[in-house]
Image (cartoon, rainbow, N blue to C red):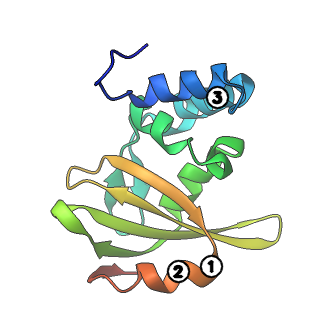
């Protein structure tokens, strides 16, 4: 529970959403399991860089229901990186794509200079161009 005036932590937000019936406890537990098994170690980004998803970052990421329902998408997006763009405050936007049930799925992750994944979203492919306007650091 948060004190009035304090911000919720990502975990507190997920717990509140579960309590309100807006997120499934089972889905959150599955995401935590995927994190323990596949995400808590650094994930290689093509080109030699690494991305690290901390448990609090996972809770922030799974606010997006498309990632909560399929938490393996977190790893697919990072491993499927095809471009990296500069964003504010030294962060990078990693654009990634992967195949799922015969369809191409795209998304982006915001990664700090130290490789920590701060947020991630699955997006519609037609929206991809607006994320490619930033300075490209690394085309794949």
Q: What residue is rendered at 41% in x and 83% in y?
A: 132
Q: Which residue is mark 3?
A: 28
User: In x, y percent, where is residue 121?
Assistant: 53, 58
Q: Nearer the viewer, residue 77 or 59?
A: 59
Is 20 left or right of 84, judged from the image as shown? right
User: In x, y percent, where is residue 59?
Assistant: 49, 34
Q: Which residue is mark 1?
A: 125
Is 53 left or right of 134, judged from the image as shown? right
Q: What residue is rendered at 66% in x and 24% in y?
A: 20
Question: In which quadrant is the C terminus drawn?
Answer: bottom left
Q: Which residue is at the far right?
A: 101
Instruction: Report, in whole angstroms, how far the alpha carbon at label 2 lies from the one at label 3.
Output: 28 Å
User: In x, y percent, where is residue 78?
Assistant: 48, 59
Q: What residue is rendered at 64% in x and 28% in y?
A: 28
Q: Residues within 10 Å of mark 3 (few under 14, many from 20)?
A: many
Q: Quadrant of residue 8?
A: top left
User: In x, y percent, where is residue 71?
Assistant: 63, 43
Find out whether the residues at labels 1 and 3 contact each other: C-beta distance under 8 Å: no
Q: What residue is rendered at 21% in x and 49% in y?
A: 114
Disc on the earlier residue, 2 or 3? 3
Q: Which residue is mark 2?
A: 128
Q: Residues within 10 Å of mark 2 (few under 14, many from 20)?
A: some
Secondary element type, mark 3:
helix
């Amino acid at each position: 529970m948060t004190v009035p005036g304090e911000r919720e932590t990502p975990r507190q937000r997920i717990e509140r959403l579960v309590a309100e019936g807006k997120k499934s406890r089972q889905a959150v537990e599955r995401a935590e399991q995927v994190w323990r098994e596949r995400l808590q170690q650094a994930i290689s980004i093509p080109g030699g860089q690494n991305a690290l998803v901390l448990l609090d970052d996972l809770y922030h990421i799974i606010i997006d229901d498309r990632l909560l329902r399929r938490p393996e998408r977190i790893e697919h997006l990072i491993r499927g990186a095809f471009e990296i763009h500069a964003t504010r405050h030294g962060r990078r936007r990693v654009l990634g794509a992967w195949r799922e049930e015969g369809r191409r799925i795209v998304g982006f992750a915001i990664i700090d200079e130290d490789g920590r994944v701060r947020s991630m979203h699955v997006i519609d492919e037609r929206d991809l161009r607006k994320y490619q306007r930033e300075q490209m650091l690394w085309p794949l």
